[in-house]
Amino acid sequence: MKKIIILLTICINTTLAQQYGSIKGVVLNKENNETLAGATVLIEGTQIGTSSTQDGQFVINNLIVGEYTLSASFVGFNVQKKKIQVRSDETIRLNFVLTPTVLNGQEVIITATRAKERETPVAFTNLTRDDIDAKYWAQDIPMLLNELPNVYSYSDNGNSIGYSYMKIRGFDQRRIGVMINGIPLNDAESHEVFWVDLPDFVSSTEDIQVQRGVGNSLYGASAFGGSVNLITTGTYFLPQVELNTGYGSFNTKKFSLSANSGMVNNTYNIYGRFSRIETDGYRKPSWSKLWSYFFGMSRFDENMVTKINIFGGPEQSYLSYRGVTRDYLDGKISGNLKEDRRINPFQYPNEIDNFYQPHFQLINDWQVSNDVRLENTLFTFLGKGDYTQFRSKRDVREYNIPRFIIKDSTIVPAGYYRNVDNDAVRDSFQVRFLDMVRKRSVNDIDFGWQPRMSWKHANGEIVAGGEYRYHKGHHYGEVIWANLLPSNIKPDWRYYDYVVPKTSVTAYIHKLYKLTPELSLMGDLQVRYHNIKLINEKRYKVDLDRKYSFITPRAGANYNFTENINAFVNVSMAKREPAFKDIYNPQDYWIGPENLPKNFIKNGDVYTYIGKEIKPERLLNSEIGGGYKTENFIIKLNLYWMDFRNEIIPTGQIDDNGVPISGNAEKTVHRGTELTASLRLLDYLRFDGNFSINDDRFVQHTEYIVNWGTTPPTVIPVVYDNKRLGGFPKYISNIRISFIIRGILASLHLQSVGRIYLDNTESNDRSISPYTIINGNLSYKYEKMIGNTDVEFSLIGNNLLDRLYESSGYVEDGTPYWIPAAGRNLYFQLRMVF
């Protein structure tokens, strides 16, 4: 008993000896200095914390003296941390001023390429997370964006999953700059974007911004038609698990499971997702099997946010990029029109593309002071894949196999050999053609660094930064089977093998200056350098080294006449280096030293390519636009005129041997008008729409066609001056009607597309006729259906009227081919959030 009394006395005396202090303050919004009610204020490393009151005030009492780190957080704002020293019997005054994130829940602000309403003088559209949830089911990203102004998308297999493509203002995606968190996605060699490598990536995307025209895209691939910046999933302040699964037409299946830790100790956030998508495809066959994963982790320090993203997933897709002739579309093959149009010309069972591209991103955002921000991004992504193809009656020389003699003429078809029998040699046949299966493989590595510094001052902001990107691609092709091979050629014969390294360096400065409260001026200056090489070319030992340097200025202005009305003007320049294969394609036997010796100089056993050069493309984009905005009504209109010089066109010039090759069209123009509008009637009815008219045509261009029926072959020049460019609709119209009430969302989307010419002849026989389709979506969200679980049921209907139409095509050797789109198809989806 005596011991207990002594211990209690010590504890009481110790407690009485402790010295205490308090902290009080307010949480404010930095943008407008208004208070934030309900913000969370925590003391790091403890369970002590509170929430701000309706007037933004907070108080924490009875703190033992000492040093503490406090953090304040609020949904839609960056976490802010501050260190303080609590003293005895003192109340420390501590205010938090939180900076809104660009996106709801997105902590890392990717500012350099993001446009802002009524400030940035460019035409753009934001697709928010709510928009994505309402429209996304399992389709590829281009098909999700197909409803945005002046965007046209299509897929090879017809049902929006697998290999898909998009165009903006008549420019294909090689001329669209695509970025993930500001990091370039376009392939360094071809400038292409392979969306199939990012299945279900939209599930981990917080926001997508699409800028049309050159705009202010300051780095990455050349943005002629526009730029697309995808921002990945942001921070959730509460833990969350989401299950998403569905099934639909063409045996389309999806399973996706994601989890978010919420804020751990107000310092860490962890997010992960795993997905699987499968489909048989509309065309027969055109299946895809797609895996996808995403892992992200964020750390919040006092003035710094650090984020790690790791994502990717292997894909397998049956190739279906070849079109069908008019007889198939008209049902003249079997008499069944709906089945004939679904036939894929590729029927070899292993005509399969396999590819895996993991991405790694490290993003650091340091708020050096109230006005200075320093961002650094390190990235790398790898690529490894191959695809196999069956090809019949191919010239053996294309595969680095010399023509060879056989004695038995029954081994290969009669048209595959030439009889060389004479008095000296009996029963001898020279094999010139073979049936074979080839496999083309690539191993890529890309890595880079993006530094950026932002300085806000009284009248605006200056952003300066750059990018270093290195790419190395190893390409090789193999003959893995043939109906006959000479004795010295073994299976897996490697017929081409080369490496393409490319280095790109970019520096830029971007200035936004508010001359008056109503007038904002924007100026950009970008300097870019590219060095692309061909090394380790095994077949002919060809080497190549090309360097390109560009300086591109951009300027614009935005004027806010009132709180509702604004207008902008923009004049921007862009330049783009040729893709590697536009310069020289080592895979093409017919343009190598053996066939076109004038294009090469031989030094010892090495050939240097000196063929006629492709000029870099140049674009001058001028546009003017404006908008009117109220709480329930938005309308925007802009007009653009894009002068395009040296557009790279197939068969656009003749080389020194008189053979047509890819070359430059002297002058083309892309011009048009874009109108967007949104109207909310009552609280539950909304109308959204856009309409664009395009006039894309050659001003000066001569195309060269080879007549192989003459000996020797002759070249025929065809003048296309003032002819319309093929491949893009004359007009695009989208209207969506949405009804939202008590957890029910019902919407109808009507899309009308004008005539699309397949080539540059403006021939209706070589075109896709205008079409109109209707899509629909019906969903019901039951909040707290099972405990705290939200359950949402969705039914998506595409092409509800079962319209038979084509979405893409091309002309080859004078014959038009079309790629048909799917008829009516449905997809049911279940989404559960725990």
Image (cartoon, grey):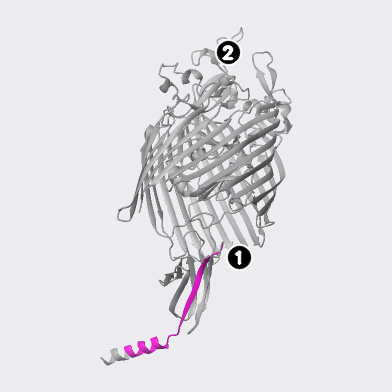
Position of 739 compared to 511: left or right? left
Q: Nearer the viewer, residue 301 or 559?
A: 559
* Between 743 and 578, the one nearer to me in the picture: 743
Q: For the point 51% across and 60% down, which residue is it?
A: 77
Badge 2 local density, few (<14 within 10 Å), some, or many (20+)?
some
Mark 1, secondary structure of its residue = loop
Q: Across the whole image, how many numbered discs are drawn on residues?
A: 2
Q: Earlier in the sequence, mark 2 or mark 1?
A: 1
Magenta segment range?
7-30
Q: Amino acid at mark 1?
A: Val
Task: Give the residue at mark 2.
Answer: 418
Q: Amino acid at mark 2?
A: Arg
Residue under pointer 1: 368
Task: Tell us which disc is closer to us: 2 or 1.
Answer: 1
- Crowding at dot 1, Cα within 10 Å, few <14 / some 14-19 / many 20+, comes out as some
Question: Which x, y percent locates residue 204?
Answer: 46, 49
Whole-number angstrom distance, CA of label 2 to CA of label 1: 77 Å
For the N terminus, the quadrant is: bottom left
